[in-house]
Image (cartoon, grey):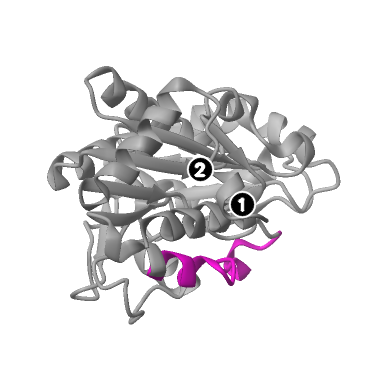
Amino acid sequence: MASADILTPHTPEGKEGLAALLARPERAVVALDFDGTLAPIVPDPEQARAHPGAVPALARLAPHLASVVVVTGRPAGVAVRYGGFAGVPGLDHLVVLGHYGAERWDAHTSDVRTPGAHPGVTAVRAELPGFLDRIGAWQGTWIEDKGGRAVAVHTRRTEDPDAAFEALRAPLAELAERHGLMVEPGRYVLELRPPGVDKGVALAAYLGETNAGSVLYAGDDLGDIAAFDAVGALRERGLPGLLVAAAATGAESPKELLTRADLTVPGPEGVVAVLNALADALS
């Protein structure tokens, strides 16, 4: 993939965001989702690993920027391990915001700051196996424990992932409401977690903390819409931003994300190409 050719936003706002990043990189923040953006989507989330070009590209780019931050629904420590982010020269100021910002890992200390388990999540985690049996969930439906701050139900391994997903929407919404939680839909996954916590809240708080002069955000799924919303709101207040969609194959890419992106690239490979193109332009 040609390095320079991929940096071609198709919207005026995206072009302005890119120009601001290139003009003042020392005030720019590059923010990235993990699964589907830095790491290819795989049937078993525990087998997800960053694209082999992701860490080298980030290490080339990060020294030119104010900050690089990974914003993910995963526990921060898990994203660090699966990403291979620890101890990489050039990434000594990388930050990972896990559990939608409820957890934080800083590369310069290697520490994870984390709150305690949410009581609603604890209750749902205990109830879910029996609950799914009672409602007749499709065979192949499985539960992912996200470490006390969220729990997810996946349908990717079922015979008909779309039908299994739709059948779970209403029952899981009722279960979540009963325990003071919300349901966040994703690609063949429904995640139950506390309300008021999302990638947009986490990203906006981090950009305020770093006094960013511009931002690039890249994501691939419905959970990234909140971050797109946050960048959109900040652009209205004068902060230039570039929104990048890491497009999945076929119908898996949410139209809500693709229609709002300033730049669409082919999955993690395309994101790596963007990172390298930025590093080339700033070198």
Is 113 a magenta residue? Answer: no
Q: Is residue 63 above or below residue 172?
A: below
Residue name at image x 83 percent, y 41 percent: 160
- Tag 2's secondary structure? strand
What residue is shown at x 76% (from left), y 34% (from top)? Answer: 251
Q: Can residue 264 be seen here?
A: yes
| Residue 263 appears left or right of 112 | right
Q: Nearer the viewer, residue 242 or 204?
A: 242
Which image quarter: residue 182?
A: top left
**Dot 1: what SS?**
helix
Q: Is residue 70 left or right of residue 157?
A: left
| Frontmost residue, 264 versus 279 | 279
Q: Which residues are magenta?
A: 43-59
Q: Quadrant of the N terminus?
A: bottom right
At 30% from the left and 30% from the top, the residue drawn is: 240
**To which quarter of the image does residue 39 belong?**
bottom right
Residue 157: where, in percent of width, then height? 76, 53
Q: Within 10 Å of the Cα at label 2, are there few (<14), some (14-19), or many (20+) other Cα atoms?
A: many
- 1 or 2: tag closer to the N-terminus: 2
- Residue 59 point in image, percent of width and height: 39, 70
Q: CA distance from mark 1 to mark 2?
A: 12 Å
Q: Amino acid at mark 1?
A: Gly
The amino acid type of the residue labelled 2 equals Gly
Q: Is residue 230 left or right of residue 42?
A: left
> Which residue, given by chain and number where applicable, does mark 2 sit on?
219
Identify whether 63 is placed above or below 179: below
Q: Residue furthest top?
A: 236
Coordinates of residue 192 in the picture (x, y in percent)? 46, 41
In the drawing, what numbered circle is on residue 270?
1
Identify whether 127 is placed above or below 250: below
